[in-house]
Image (tube, grey):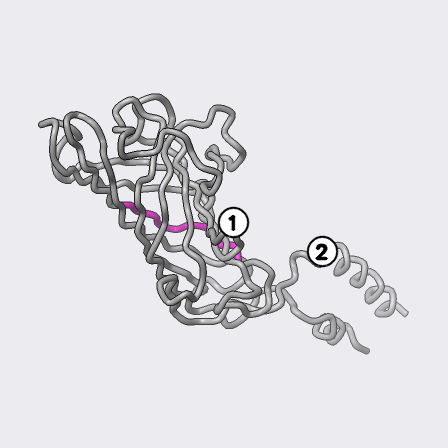
Amino acid sequence: MKNAILILLLTAVMVASAAAVYAGPPLSGTWKSTNNDFDEGTATSQANGVNSYLTVAAVLYGRSYSGGFTNDWEIACTQSVSVTPLTGALGSTGNGNYIFLITYAGGYLNLGGPGNPWNGGDAVYSGVIDTYTEVRTIQWVNNAVVGAVSDHSVTAHIQGYPESCVTWGIGNGVLRGGDYPFFNYGVLQSLKPANYPDFHTSNCVLAPVPYGHWDDIRDLTISITGCAVATEPTTWGAVKAKYRD
């Protein structure tokens, strides 16, 4: 009788916490957006004030897009903590290319399950970002920014699975526009189109005063490894077996 009561209690707990049960880990492998394995996307960077295109506390938010936002991937609310010039101060000569290393901290990564090549059964795979860097090259002509390209690199641990369950990715960013007085609006956009995400703050809510820049995110490569075993029970039978007479 005691075990029967315990089984009933566990049933209630399992129903109440069904969202915490994992159906299956993501598959190991490497996939590329250029092979149409998953969607490319767009991103915004919420600035921390006017003229803060290259300062700390900018919040990056990106999401996959294909005729509309999709659930293939999401980079949510990682924040710049350092900006290191690799070729000198921006605009120091009025013309030229300038390269900066931007380091981010915090935030998370989501990978959608169904319809994606890494799908192992979960609706979404959520990961905590471990490292995120961006190498940004900015083209400056007649004291104005006319373009920028970036190399992005991110690693994250997928939650709910072993510590070895890691995903990492690389991709390219292309500046499309922004809200800065030193942007050349003859070649860059001054108003953010709807196919770029809304600006977000560091706690991942919509920014009360949207201000910053927006980019295309292309040529992505995503790799996953070490996710074979879930840390939560995946079947009710496995739980019952622990309490049999």
Question: In the picture, which quadrant includes the N terminus?
Answer: bottom right
Looking at the image, which residue sits at the far bottom? 245
Task: Report the residue at 34% width, 37% height from top.
Answer: 80
Residue 205's x, y, as percent? 54, 34
Q: Percent from the top left, x then y, of residue 71? A: 53, 54
Tell me the distance, in whole angstroms, between the alpha carbons under discs 2 and 1. 29 Å
Q: Secondary structure at mark 2?
A: loop
- Name the spot of residue 64 as percent of width and height, x first: 46, 52
Which residue is located at x 25 percent, y 29 percent?
184
Give the residue at x 81% y 58%: 12
Amino acid marked by disc 2: Ser
Amino acid residing under circle 1: Phe
Image-based side of 87 in relation to 112, left or right: left
**Residue lying at 12% horizontally and 38% vertically, measured from the top left:** 87
In the image, the segment drawn in magenta is 125-134
Locate the C terminus and report the quarter of the image it occupies.
Answer: bottom right
Q: Is residue 124 left or right of residue 199?
A: right
30 or 35, which lies in front?
Answer: 35
**Label 1's element?**
strand
Snapshot quadrant of residue 11 = bottom right
Task: Pick whichever, 208 or 40, lies toward us.
Answer: 40
Q: Is residue 119 magenta?
A: no
128 magenta-colored:
yes
**In the image shown, does 140 or 184 lie closer to the viewer?**
184
Q: Find disc 2 in the rendering and name its residue.
A: 17
Mark nearer the viewer, 2 or 1 = 1
Q: Is residue 119 above or below residue 201?
A: below
Mark 2 or mark 1: which comes first in sequence? 2
Report which residue position mark 1 lands on: 69
Please state if 236 lies on the left or on the right of 150 as rendered: right
> Which residue ends up furthest to the front in the rendered image?
186
